[in-house]
Image (tube, rainbow, N blue to C red):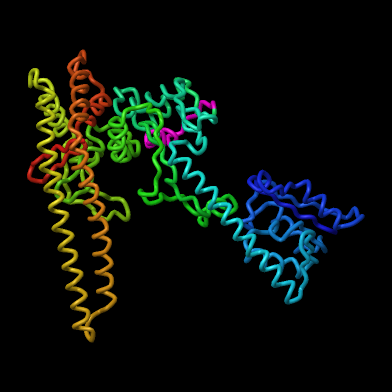
């Protein structure tokens, strides 16, 4: 049985004239007058990778002895990489005869040299094509053009102007998503709640379907495009083309390029930049605030942290002298918990009432200066805490460096008696702790930087105060509405064993 193999990628069909019809026609002429022919065609597959459906099927049929002759139009149809060409030709010739229409391939030193030279040239051409296309796209982006239609929800792509234009039916949904996330007003709970809300209201997705997934909502909230800038050359996708043929653990992930390589392209804004930045701050807290579902609701869920050990404080129902009580605690009983907690325990009703009354006090008992008072109080507490936290982290990092240096000196000076394995374990623990501290330091610096946006913070607080004072009955507010108000103001509430409480603003 004779096999005819043909391959074309979209770019080659458009630019180089490597049509599948012509390849098959040339291969059939080479095969002569015979009906014992099978065609193996890869339409739209790059020659950079070996993982191609028709090629894979051909290789399997060769191994099973179904094929005794393979005819290919040109060596670069097998592969654009010389190494892959040599692998395939060697594999094929163990079981069958390999013939090229465009090029005489013989197992002689001269023939092999010519074959390898052609393979090297084909690989070079592929690299140059890729480089030219990438350079062309980058130049277009620098001219302010949107390189391709990325199907961004809320926009339509104008092919003639190569620009994004706002598509109002979708843009209003984008604005709604940001509004529900920043100011839920008891309508939704977290990102998953927004997805369900959109489905209940019947808003269509980009593909016209009515199913919204939480990840799609999250991608909308994280997309820079909506505040007026679309970045080209942001993602490094090298090697990802073959991911669909690989197992999950072998796939190459998409990663960010260095920030200085990104090319910004201005597009019409759907929301204001300050709204987008505020949403990003809320996103950093969303997983902790909305993670998991408990049988019982706790007003301060996702807000409390132990000021002594740093553990989050969560609500639970526990038994005390034969009676069930609701409490907050920093104790972690789960397997693998790095910090079991220092045993800080608080009665739910007591701390709930204290925090809520403190909040109500700030908003309602300050007269006309309510929003100024709450902004000033929270700002002072926040700056004081975060600055102190930054100083603590820097001291801890210095201590880790000193401890590491002492361990290394001790190991060098006492090589004959020291337990090297124990020292290495200690160094590993210090390294892990240092990485954790550096992460916390980076987050703390970001929070301090974000606190400089006082104008927008005051606007958020003013809106919150306005909504609160117009509530008909504060006493009848649901726990969800109370949580909405508290989370608009506080990022975290730190509880210390000595009774001290620190309110950290968002």
Circle count: 0
Rendered view: 85 above or below 423: above
In the image, residue 450 lies at what x, y percent?
22, 39
Nearest to the observer: residue 448 or residue 209: 448
Which image quarter holds the C terminus? top left
Magenta-span inclusion, residue 137: no
Which residue is at 13% across, 35% downward?
379
In the image, residue 168 lies at what x, y percent?
44, 21
Which image quarter holds the N terminus? bottom right
Q: Which quarter of the picture shows residue 353? A: top left
Nearest to the observer: residue 382 or residue 432: 382
Rendered view: 45 above or below 460: below
- Classify residue 58 as left or right of residue 255: right
Which residue is at 49% across, 50% downward?
237
Q: Which quarter of the picture shows residue 86? A: bottom right
From this viewpoint, is residue 317 visible?
no
From this viewpoint, is residue 358 visible?
yes
Rendered view: 423 above or below 362: below
In the image, residue 359 lies at what x, y percent?
14, 27
* Magenta range: 208-224
Magenta-span inclusion, residue 217: yes
Which residue is at 47% across, 36% downward?
146
Nearest to the observer: residue 281 or residue 166: 166
Rendered view: 25 above or below 502: below
Which residue is at 18% across, 27% downward?
458
In the image, residue 369 lies at what x, y percent?
9, 21
Furthest residue in direction right, as rendered: 33
- Classify residue 285 as left or right of residue 106: left
Furthest residue in direction bottom, as rendered: 416
């Amino acid at each position: 049985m004779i096999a005819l193999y043909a391959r074309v990628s979209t770019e080659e069909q458009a630019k180089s004239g490597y049509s599948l019809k012509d390849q098959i026609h040339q291969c059939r002429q080479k095969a002569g007058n015979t009906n014992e022919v099978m065609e193996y065609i890869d339409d739209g597959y790059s020659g950079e990778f070996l993982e191609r459906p028709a090629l894979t099927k051909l290789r399997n049929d060769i191994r099973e002895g179904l094929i005794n002759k393979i005819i290919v139009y040109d060596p670069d149809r097998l592969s654009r990489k010389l190494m892959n060409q040599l692998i395939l030709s060697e594999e094929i010739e163990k079981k069958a005869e390999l013939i090229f229409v465009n090029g005489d391939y013989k197992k002689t030193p001269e023939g092999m040299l010519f074959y390898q030279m052609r393979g090297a040239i084909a690989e070079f051409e592929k690299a140059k094509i890729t480089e030219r296309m990438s350079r062309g796209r980058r130049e277009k982006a620098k001219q302010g053009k949107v390189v391709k239609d990325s199907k961004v929800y809320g926009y339509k792509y104008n092919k003639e102007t190569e620009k994004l234009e706002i598509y109002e039916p979708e843009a209003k949904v984008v604005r709604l998503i940001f509004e529900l996330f920043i100011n839920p007003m008891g309508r939704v709970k977290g990102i998953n709640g927004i997805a369900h809300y959109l489905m209940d209201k019947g808003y269509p997705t980009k593909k016209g379907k009515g199913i919204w997934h939480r990840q799609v909502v999250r991608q909308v909230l994280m997309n820079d495009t909506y505040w007026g800038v679309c970045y080209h050359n942001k993602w490094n996708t090298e090697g990802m083309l073959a991911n669909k043929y690989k197992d999950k653990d072998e796939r190459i992930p998409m990663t960010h390029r260095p920030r200085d390589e990104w090319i910004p392209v201005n597009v019409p804004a759907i929301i204001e930049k300050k709204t987008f930045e505020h949403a990003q701050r809320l996103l950093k807290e969303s997983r902790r605030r909305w993670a998991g579902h408990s049988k019982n609701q706790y007003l301060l869920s996702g807000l409390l942290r132990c000021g002594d050990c740093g553990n989050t404080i969560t609500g639970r129902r526990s038994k005390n002298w034969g009676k069930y009580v609701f409490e907050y605690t920093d104790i972690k009983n789960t397997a693998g918990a790095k910090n079991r907690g220092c045993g800080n325990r608080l009665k739910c009703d007591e701390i709930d009432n204290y925090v809520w009354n403190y909040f109500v006090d700030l908003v309602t008992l300050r007269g006309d200066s309510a929003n100024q008072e709450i902004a000033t109080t929270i700002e002072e507490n926040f700056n004081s805490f975060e600055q102190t936290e930054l100083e603590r982290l820097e001291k801890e990092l210095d201590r880790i460096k000193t401890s590491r240096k002492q361990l290394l000196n001790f190991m060098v000076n006492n090589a004959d008696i020291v337990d090297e394995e124990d020292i290495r374990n200690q160094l590993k623990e210090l390294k892990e702790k240092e990485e954790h501290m550096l992460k916390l330091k980076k987050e703390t610096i970001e929070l301090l930087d974000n606190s400089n946006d006082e104008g927008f913070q005051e606007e958020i607080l003013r809106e919150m105060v306005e909504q609160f004072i117009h509530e008909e009955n504060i006493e009848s507010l649901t726990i969800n509405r109370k949580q909405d108000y508290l989370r608009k103001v506080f990022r975290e509430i730190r509880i210390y064993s000595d009774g001290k409480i620190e309110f950290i603003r968002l």
